[in-house]
């Protein structure tokens, strides 16, 4: 029998909130980056693409460590946030969001970039000959044609954020209701030998992840996202 | 038919299109300085890779040139030296791509409306209804592009371009991606466009029959340069064109359906300087028709030959003799009472018959290719 207490529920709620905020931010930030990567002929395309993809291969602890240093009281991000009177970001929800944005970036940017590249030059040229300016074309032609890419990007960005552990632990620590997400809560239950509660959450994550991937791979015309 | 472009609207004076472009990339240079008529259909004709599509893209603003100057009437659209560049979406053009390039996420009706609703109401001279009627796509309006045949898609593409009320219509081989049957399905619509709308058209093609059928004016391209331009009939009758064009030399003659000979199932086509008999045509007397006479289908005789199965004989005067694509042949341009004729005969025959400029001859037409 699944047994969840109020701390577990808070962790679930916090995880969903984190994933939602992160996904929304990633779509806003990732769209222009993906568009630029898909269209540019700049020599910076390679380096920027590589930076975006780094979280795919880096251990989350490495990413978390550098983010922690940067956002700490002596880091350049930390100095900046302190100057703004915001204090420092580590061990706050905002800090988790910033870290998650970096961590899940490739999972949003790459499907979007693929979708934009698949559209090709022709629909953009056709729109221009039909009096649509660049912004108009982006909203009336590119966004609708790239819709499957946006769906994939949102699902992957959300799911990947839900599944993070190492970065959260490095940046957010383990503050109940504030930075303690489901993956950390499971770890705590196991540490405390509370296997029944660990099962409840772990089973939930398993089902959730499976359903997400099921949706992704069963969509009509689904392509491998990478 | 009710067209919103009609004789009641004062016809604007024809604008010339002045286009100077130089575009180069490894292995290719387009270098042209053209003054094109802003009226009727001008064919940009040449083999693939000769630069005609590149020029069309330059005129649309889809391609930038190393040197670029473009004026439509007294409006400057582009002048590299002065830093003037009107972006594509601000040029009053319509563009028809080789593949229709419809928006896959929009229905036919929404594709048509896409351009039209972006044009200020005061500048809409071609109504959606008129464009739909002209291209015969009424029954397709609710369909999605993916469910259309190639020919249907191209008709929608043309209507979509027309619905923006362009002041210049650019067409890049609109029939090239279609098979012969689909081509035949679209050509009549293109002819209607020509006859019913007063929009100048630049039409890129490498198909001589299409050009002969549709164009009023022709610009011949070879290896990124313009080798000849002028009225269709005069230009095609020129003998000083590069071999690439003389291989397929011939003339286009515009004729009027004279009368039908029901007994023999023939139709007489009249034109200045004579007539020809062809297999019975469906058109009524008075209908205008163009036909092509290939130079290889014209033979010459010094007298009117009797007792021959060739019925189409025209008296004509030799105007020019020039080298043909092989050393064994010559091309002879004749004037048949106002209608040009080109014959491709062997050099031997030329000498034996004594073909010389100013000499009256008989042209024997073995075959004509009717266009339309």
Image (cartoon, helix red, strand yellow):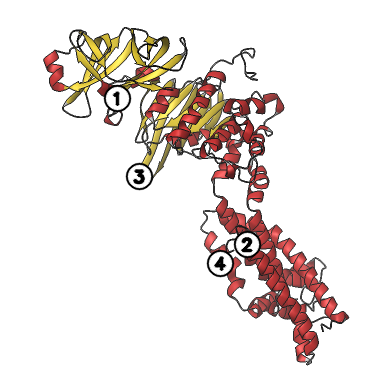
In this figure, which residue is indicated by the disc labeled 4? Answer: A50
The quarter of the picture where residue B161 lies is: top right
In front: mark 1 or mark 3? Answer: 1
Q: Are marks 4 and 2 on the same chain?
A: yes
Whether residues under marks 3 and 4 lie with C-beta atoms below 8 angstroms apart, the answer is no
Q: Chain of mark 1?
A: B
Task: Check disc 3 and report its element: helix, strand or loop.
Answer: loop
Point out the frontmost of discs 4 and 2. Answer: 2
Specify the quadrant that holds the N terminus of chain B.
top right
Q: CA distance from mark 1 to mark 4?
A: 58 Å
Residue at image mark 1: B249
Report if the CB atoms under discs 1 and 2 are less than 8 Å apart.
Answer: no
- Whether discs 3 and 2 lie on one chain: the answer is no
Q: Residues within 10 Å of mark 4 (few under 14, many from 20)?
A: few
How far is disc 3 from disc 2 in space, using C-alphas? Answer: 37 Å
**Residue behind mark 2:** A109
Q: Nearer the viewer, residue B51 or B149?
A: B149
Q: Residue at x 50, y 40 (%)?
A: B99
The residue that mark 3 highlights is B27
């Amino acid at each position: 029998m699944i047994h969840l207490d109020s701390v577990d529920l808070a962790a679930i709620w916090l995880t969903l909130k984190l994933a939602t905020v992160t996904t929304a931010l990633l779509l806003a930030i990732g769209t222009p980056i993906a568009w630029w990567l898909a269209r540019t002929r700049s020599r910076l395309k390679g380096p920027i693409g590589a930076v975006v993809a780094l979280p795919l291969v880096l251990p989350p602890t490495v990413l978390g460590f550098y983010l922690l240093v940067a956002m700490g009281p002596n880091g350049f991000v930390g100095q900046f946030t302190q100057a703004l009177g915001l204090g420092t970001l580590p061990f706050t929800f905002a800090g988790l969001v910033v870290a998650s944005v970096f961590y899940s970036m490739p999972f949003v940017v790459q499907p979007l970039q693929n979708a934009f590249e698949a559209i090709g030059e022709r629909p953009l040229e056709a729109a221009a000959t039909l009096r649509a300016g660049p912004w108009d074309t982006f909203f009336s032609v590119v966004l609708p044609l790239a819709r499957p890419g946006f769906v994939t990007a949102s699902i992957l960005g959300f799911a990947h954020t839900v599944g993070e552990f190492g970065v959260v632990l490095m940046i957010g620590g383990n503050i109940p209701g504030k930075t303690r997400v489901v993956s950390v809560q499971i770890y705590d239950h196991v540490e405390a030998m509370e296997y029944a509660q660990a099962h409840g959450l772990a089973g939930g994550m398993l089902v959730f992840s499976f359903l997400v991937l099921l949706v992704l791979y069963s969509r009509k015309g689904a392509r491998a996202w990478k | 038919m009710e067209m919103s472009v009609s004789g009641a609207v004062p016809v604007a004076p024809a604008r010339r299109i002045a286009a100077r472009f130089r575009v180069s990339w490894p292995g290719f240079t387009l270098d042209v300085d053209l003054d094109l008529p802003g009226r009727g259909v001008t064919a940009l004709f040449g083999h693939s890779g000769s630069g005609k599509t590149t020029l069309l893209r330059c005129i649309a603003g889809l391609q930038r040139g190393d040197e670029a100057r473009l004026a439509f009437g007294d409006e400057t659209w582009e002048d590299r030296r002065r830093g003037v560049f009107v972006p594509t979406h601000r040029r009053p053009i319509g563009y028809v791509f080789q593949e229709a390039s419809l928006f896959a996420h929009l229905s036919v009706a929404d594709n048509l409306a896409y351009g039209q609703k972006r044009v200020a109401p005061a500048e809409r001279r071609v109504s959606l209804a008129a464009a739909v009627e002209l291209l015969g796509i009424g029954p397709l309006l609710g369909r999605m592009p993916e469910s259309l045949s190639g020919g249907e898609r191209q008709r929608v593409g043309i209507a979509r371009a027309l619905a923006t009320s362009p002041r210049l219509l650019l067409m890049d081989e609109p029939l090239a991606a279609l098979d012969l049957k689909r081509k035949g399905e679209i050509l009549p619509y293109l002819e209607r466009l020509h006859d019913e709308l007063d929009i100048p058209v630049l039409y890129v093609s490498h198909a001589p029959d299409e050009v002969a059928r549709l164009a009023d004016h022709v610009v011949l391209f070879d290896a990124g340069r313009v080798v000849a331009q002028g009225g269709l009939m005069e230009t095609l009758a020129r003998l000083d064109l590069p071999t690439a064009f003389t291989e397929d030399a011939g003339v286009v003659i515009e004729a009027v359906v004279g009368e039908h000979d029901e007994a023999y199932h023939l139709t007489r086509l009249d034109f200045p300087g004579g007539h020809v008999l062809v297999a019975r045509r469906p058109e009524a007397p008075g209908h205008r028709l163009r036909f092509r006479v290939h130079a290889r289908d014209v033979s010459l005789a010094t007298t009117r030959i009797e007792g021959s199965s060739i019925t189409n004989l025209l008296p004509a005067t030799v105007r020019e003799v020039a080298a043909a694509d092989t050393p064994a042949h010559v091309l002879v341009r004749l004037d048949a009472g106002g209608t040009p004729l080109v014959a491709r005969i062997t050099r031997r025959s030329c000498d034996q018959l004594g073909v010389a400029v100013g000499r009256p001859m008989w042209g024997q037409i073995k075959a004509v290719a009717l266009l339309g």
